[in-house]
Amino acid sequence: MKILHTADWHIGKKLHKHSLQPDFDLFIDWLCDCIAEKKVEVLMVSGDVFDLANPSSEARQQYFKALMKLKRLDCKIILTGGNHDSPTMLNAPQEVLRELDIHIIGGLPIELSECIIPVKNKQNKTEVVIAALPYLRDADLRTASQGNSYEDRLEALRKGIQQTFLDAAEICKIQYPGVLAIAMGHLFAAGAETSES
């Protein structure tokens, strides 16, 4: 099974008041060609679908056109929200798009198991499960009892993110034993170093 991962589409972005709408259309054309050429079966988009939490009607229209263009290629599409996205705005058409085998997780749902998406092969057997975790916001992770200092809040966020991913892994292990699990997320990276690899 071939899976293609992308992120940070930032639909609706303007650069020095110059619209990047034509550039996004070119990107989607390239992406469609790549998916068709490589026979990709799953497309994963990890957050920042839009550039603004309340995108313009033109940006929303471009988004839906892009999804329909990609859907014609007969691949499963899984999108998660990023820090630029509004979870409610992304989730609004969730049920309709799910009928088209397009899965959207705009924000962390109450039931974490809703983020676990099975992907079946041509023999209708679950070949892989995707833990589609959206950008984890402070409100998703912290409780009122945790410290008030910046360091305390930062540590609570780190532990909350780690625990959410561990919980998703456990759900995959229990519900889909022996099936490959892939986690996708939209995170900030800190303390990274370059290496030779």
Image (cartoon, rainbow, N blue to C red):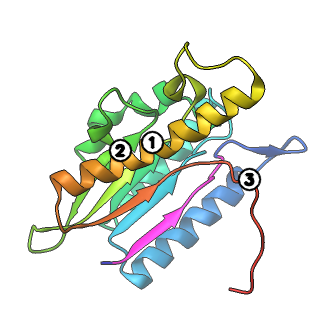
Image side of residue 93 versus residue 52, left or right:
left
Q: Is residue 191 above or below residue 134?
A: below
Residue at 59 percent of width and 31 percent of height = 57
Mark nearer the N terminus (1 vs 3): 1
Tell me if residue 7 is in the magenta stretch. Answer: yes
Q: Is the residue under label 2 in contact with that under label 1 (CB below 8 Å)?
A: yes
Q: Nearer the viewer, residue 111 or 174?
A: 174
Q: Which element type, helix, strand or loop, lies under badge 2?
A: helix
- Percent x, y of residue 149: 75, 21
Image side of residue 127 versus residue 14, left or right:
left
Q: Given the image, on which type of amino acid does mark 2 rest?
A: Asp
Mark nearer the N terminus (2 vs 3): 2
Image quarter hosting the N terminus:
bottom left
Disc 2 from disc 3: Cα separation: 22 Å
The residue wearing badge 1 is: 163
Q: Is residue 94 above or below residue 78?
A: above
Residue 190, numbered label: 3
Image quarter hosting the C terminus:
bottom right
- Percent x, y of residue 126: 16, 65
Q: Residues within 10 Å of mark 2 (few under 14, many from 20)?
A: some
- Percent x, y of residue 135: 55, 40
* Residue range of the region highlighted in magenta in the rendering: 2-10
